[in-house]
Image (cartoon, rainbow, N blue to C red):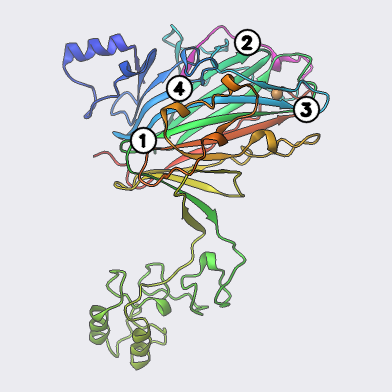
Amino acid sequence: MKSKSRLAFALLVLVTGLSTTAHAAPDCSNYSDSRLMQWPDTDPVWEFCWRDAGDSQPQPDGSGLELFDVYYNGHLVFARAHVPILNVEYGPGGCGCFRDWLDSPRRFDAEGLPCSNGFCETTVEPTTICDCAPTNSCDANPSNACNVDIGGFTGVAATAEPTRLTLTTQTSAGWYRYIMKWRFYLDGTLEPVFEFGATPNGCTDASHFHHGYYRLDFDIDGAADDEVFTEVQADSGTDSDSDGVADSSDNCVAVVNPDQNDGDGDGFGNLCDADFNNDAIVNAVDLGIMKSLFFSDDAAVDLNSDGIVNVVDLGLLKTLFFTSPGPAGSASETQSIATETAGYASADQTWIVQDAVTGRGYRIVPGGQDHKLTADTFDPTGFAKGDFWALRQRSNEVDDGVNFGGGCSAQLDDFVNDESLTGEDVVFWYRLGTQHIGMDECFCGSRGPRLEPVGDWSAD
Ligand SMILES: [Cu+2]
């Protein structure tokens, strides 16, 4: 990988007059204390500026290892991605609640070359307070080696493997230790990872819940023209036409077709698809195609699949005239989020933020444990406030301002005020969290969503 200081990069540009890639690399001089990353070395697919947690904004709490102007294959993904809100709530008999900070880097074990000035280029992932084999349970670990600081490196470690680049950092807030990773894959997948640890103290013997709030300021192909969708998995038990095939996999949801025959393989069953030229409308052109194949056994035009194209099929075509093929069911139902929305996620819910013009987007797929809010001694939902907030980008909404008004709980709901999202610059906030039952602080509860590219992200 390449990671150059701003100065070194400016020097390179001066000397060569050229960037090392076909398009201009992000200009990290726009973001104080940030550095450029390009990976892989040759023909980089990921290019972005990153800023160490110690320099992160906004103050007073910072926002961890920040990313700016993140490009995949030369296409802009994020303007900024970081964690401005971090908090913890204790159950009965515990220590109340805390608003924590993500701007105090803490040492961990990273070895590589170069490994200085807060940056360590490694070939194996570094070891943090959360990597404590053989057990994650402090109680079960005889040497109790899981919740002590180790290593002598402070800053950001970058680990290049054949198919992914991982940036890792560790910070402290009192006795707590927080690990942030960003994993960048060659195929465009991006995985933020958050882990929650601690050193020994009197509080964590009581059950408590940690919450981190990612702020993902998507600027896919620029700030304009964003749209947000939510995808909910269809109820696999519903069968609207009672043909024995559930809607979620029925290629004619409204027509009884237990055989599911689809002669042209376009996803619509023959009985609801007289669109032979696949232009999405049944019209005179399709009628002409049927005429030319009359008395043949053409698999696509034989609408009732009885082995011959005849007057029965012509009758079926007439009933489908001027309609679109389908509808066919799908495993997920996509709905637009047209105005600012927040809430808790339902099972299997995912989201897509995409550019309406280019069709490029990212799907946000929650990690299986990210949203879990079951606690044995108290209800953490009131404190968590939600799992997601789809908001219009506002420069005064980078933090929730709680530090000016007091309180531990996230106050993102104050930003939800019916502003339109369609065609705007969208910010997606994503909460993840984990419960620590008393004495299990060696369990760090690795959390994080998977961000998958949607659309054509190949290089221009
Ligand atoms: Cu904890």
Name the residue carrying label 1: 219
Q: Is residue 154 magenta?
A: yes
Number of the front mark, 2 or 1: 1
Indicate the amino acid at tag 4. Answer: Glu
Residue 244 in the image: x percent, y percent? 58, 75
Q: CA distance from mark 4 to mark 1?
A: 15 Å
Q: Residues within 10 Å of mark 3 (few under 14, many from 20)?
A: many
Q: Height in image: 260 above or below 344?
A: below
In primary-sequence order, the first of circles 3 and 1 is 3
- Say what secondary structure mark 4 lies in: strand
Badge 2 vs badge 1, beta-carbon distance below 8 Å = no
In primary-sequence order, the first of circles 2 and 4 is 4
Name the residue carrying label 2: 150
Q: CA distance from mark 3 to mark 1?
A: 39 Å
- Say what secondary structure mark 2 lies in: loop
Q: Dominant secondary structure of the magenta stretch?
A: loop
Name the residue carrying label 3: 207
Residue 104 or residue 195, whichever sits in front: 104
Q: CA distance from mark 2 to mark 3?
A: 25 Å
Q: CA distance from mark 2 to mark 4?
A: 24 Å
Residue sitting at x 53%, y 14%: 60
In primary-sequence order, the first of circles 4 and 1 is 4
Residue 426 or residue 39, whichever sits in front: 426
Name the residue carrying label 4: 66
